[in-house]
Image (spheres, rainbow, N blue to C red):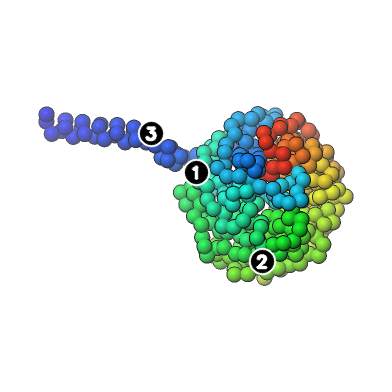
Amino acid sequence: MPRAVRLAVSVVVAVTAVTATLASSPSVAAEAPREGGHDAVFVQTDNPAGNQVVAYHRGEDGQLTQREVYDTGGQGGKLDGSMVDHLASQGSLTYDPEHALLYAANAGSNTVTVFAVDGDRLTRRQVVDSGGCFPVSVAVRGDSVFVLNALDGGSVQGFTVHDGRLDARPDRHRDLGLDPNATPQFTNTPGQVGFTGDGRQLVVTTKANGNNLDVFDLAPDGTPAATPTVTNLPGAVPFAFVPNGPRGLFLTEAGPNALATLHVHHDGTATQQALAATNQSATCWVTRIGDLLYVSNAGSSTVTTIRATDDGHTLTPLGNTPTDPGTVDTAATHDGHYLYVQTGGNGIVDEFAVQGDGSLTALGSVTVPDAAGGEGIVAF
């Protein structure tokens, strides 16, 4: 056989072998490019018998159709004293848009699951130790991820994202030093970890275990300061928040059942600028759509709509919308047209269309399998 023919045959054989290897290798298939989440809603069950994420396709009318159920490879958890909100936190299911990843906190097994997201489909990539006890909230910005662990005094554990996986960073672990014996657990554990809008500070709410806002300055490489700057908010029971500009926060306060506007200063201290009472019970979760804030009231089974003006210096309640029992976590689509409300009483997600004046129109609901008391929802 001539040399040129032999070379051509060798190339064909090599290409065929590589193609066969790629097709048969699940690890390589998991590396295929993904376009991220769209037309989907993902709901975490937090089932202690086996945590799962249930995927729904979102129709053009905003209504949901169940697709697949994905095992996280971990267990859900339940804090002592909780009724409809077993994690008593915001951000237990978090989407990473830069890397098209979904992070699910497995509170009962002290782990975090990493899923790759493609439309309304998930591929499990990793289950990693949370770096503490009872993870309840995950925050992401760029390549930095922080997990909030709620028990044993509370802690935050930092990770970096590399090739679709989380790499633990021992130098980014910080203990919160909360009272580990304070009861009931569901009001005395930290509620959320997140970033200020400019990404320069990491924020943790402690709820009734101190009634504090803990703010860690972040070094340019993402390493948090050794200790936080603590702002005490007497009786507030600070629970959940969303950013308001570079250094502002919209913060729910379960003590007075209200939404507050706070400014976080460069030194880490925080100043309250406005407060709006919901006149409801167990005001804990918040989602933002433009100048509208949707606040969940677990005890009243309602969502309060509040409009923020003057950079949040004015907060105006617009009314309450009833939901199924036990209103907990919420999520809005990127275009702001739809709001999905997770209710823990019976594990139901209520579907709403968002009107131009901020009011909500009920579209229907779906029952999430084995999700009573569950928290964690992401929408696209």
Quadrant in the picture for residue 301: top right
User: Badge 1 is on which residue?
Assistant: 125
Q: Crowding near pointer 3: few (<14 within 10 Å), some, many (20+)? A: few
Quadrant in the picture for residue 328: top right
Q: Which residue is drawn at 81% across and 65% down?
A: 234
The relative height of residue 306 versus residue 221 in the rendered view (above or below) is above
Q: What residue type is labelled 3?
A: Ser
User: Which one is nearer the viewer's eye here, 358 or 375?
Assistant: 375
Q: Which amino acid does label 1 sit on?
A: Arg
Residue 356 percent across, percent down from the top left: 78, 39
Quadrant in the picture for residue 29: top left
User: Badge 3 is on which residue?
Assistant: 24
**Horizontal relation, residue 193 to residue 308: left or right:** left
Q: How far apart are marks 3 and 1 (CA)?
A: 17 Å
Q: Is mark 1 on a helix, strand or loop?
A: strand
Number of numbered labels in the structure image: 3
